[in-house]
Image: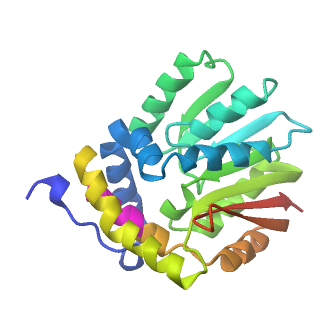
Amino acid sequence: MEDKEKRYPSIKKITREEHIEIVQEIFSTITEKYDFLNHFLSLRRDIAWRKFAVKKMKFKKTNRLLDVACGTCDVALYAAERYPGIKVFCIDFVQEMLEAGRKKISDKGLNRRVDLIRGDGCFLPFCDALFDVAVIAFGIRNISDKKKALSEMTRVVVPKGQVMVLEMAFTRNWFSNLLYRFYLNCMLPALAKIFSRNYKAYHYLADSIMNFPDPEDFKRMMEESGLEDVKINKLTLGITYLFLGTKK
């Protein structure tokens, strides 16, 4: 059986090591159509969600931003364009994603202001209190040890610095939830099959959204990681949430 026909197991049934291997395999095989499918499958709402997060950023001490699990660097690019005085560091452990991001950065002429690093969000290669803001957009559901990643993001921001998580989750309305579940399990993989050579990856991505913690539970996770005044911003009827906390 060809790799593209592989059916990925549920994230509830795999170890951390298996999770890492699956995520690396998936994102290395969908890079070519990643941006297009993000925009197409979200009806371009993903652009608005990322820009909303960028608008909430505050740079007061270091003028440095860390983009964790950066993918193809959309958040980093939006932030660099909106805040001309900042320096952005992007980290991801999928080399193919970083290479795609590097091309976009070069096309924008931002090579001197945006640095790319291959690394693990659970073990950030930075000293303490180096950044004003640490953000992760649509990436934390692909990290098995979410609390470890949140603790690392908290560690590397300055006191009163921001930790931001932009992530998709289920709505709290049962009818909307039913429609969302149908979309994730049926329509999304069917649409992805038309454009992606590894459309089975979108079954995994749907599974990762359905198994993301309840927003209130995730807020408590952020608080347990050393953050306070955690705000939950519900976007597009609760399809996506922006969690924003400050370091104690």
Q: Main secondary structure of the magenta part?
A: helix
In which image quadrant can residue 116 be found? top right
Q: Report the residue at 33% width, 45% height from top.
A: 30
Colouring rule applied to residues:
rainbow
Q: Is residue 189 rendered to the left or right of residue 121? A: left
Residue 180 in the image: x percent, y percent? 46, 71
Q: Residue furthest top?
A: 109
Is 200 contained in the magenta span? yes
Vertical order, 198 against 146 (above or below):
above
In this picture, which residue range is highlighted in magenta? 199-206
Viewer-nearest residue: 136 or 53: 53
In which image quadrant can residue 140 be found? bottom right
Residue 185 in the image: x percent, y percent? 34, 70
Q: Is residue 20 visible?
A: yes
Residue 99 in the image: x percent, y percent? 44, 30
Viewer-nearest residue: 18 or 104: 104
Q: Is residue 150 rendered to the left or right of residue 195? A: right
Q: Is residue 64 rendered to the left or right of residue 209? A: right
Viewer-nearest residue: 127 or 151: 151
Q: Report the residue at 86% width, 39% height from top.
A: 59
Vertical order, 17 against 10 (above or below):
above
